[in-house]
Amino acid sequence: LKITNPNAPSDKLAIQIEKEEEQAIEELKQLEALQKEEKKKIEEIEEEKKKHETNVMAIDKKVIEKKNELKRKFGHS
């Protein structure tokens, strides 16, 4: 927008629009930054979940191995 006379009504409107546009762009940047942070948090949570799932699977495997060992030891089927 071209501003020729800051006191003219059309130029005042142009100045107002520019200010609002700048604010909107700034808000958008902040929202994008928040979005990146949230994505990062989600990725971290997903990684933690995988670790826990792996731990649970390892524990399940140990439980099954122990049961099989006890079955062999005591002859139960």
Image (cartoon, helix red, strand yellow):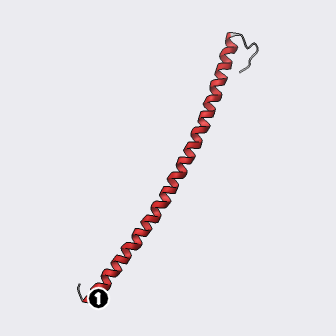
The furthest residue to the left: 76
Residue 7: x percent and y percent?
72, 11
The furthest residue to the top: 8
User: Dividing the picture into quarters, in which one does residue 26 lie?
Assistant: top right
- Disc 1, SS: helix
User: Is 75 positioned to the left or the right of 9 in the image?
Assistant: left
Q: Identify the residue position indicated by label 1 in the image.
A: 72
Q: Name the quarter where the N terminus is drawn.
A: top right
Residue at x 55% of width, y 44% of height? 35
Residue at x 63% of width, y 27% of height? 21
User: Is 69 positioned to the left or the right of 43 in the image?
Assistant: left
User: Is 13 positioned to the left or the right of 65 in the image?
Assistant: right
User: Dividing the picture into quarters, in which one does residue 8 lie?
Assistant: top right
Residue at x 62% of width, y 24% of height? 20
User: Dividing the picture into quarters, in which one does residue 2 lie?
Assistant: top right
- 64 is higher (above) or lower (below) than 20: below
- 42 is higher (above) or lower (below) than 69: above
Residue at x 53% of width, y 49% of height? 39
Residue 4: x percent and y percent?
76, 15
Residue 6: x percent and y percent?
73, 14
The amino acid on which the numbered mark 1 sits, given as a three-letter code, is Arg
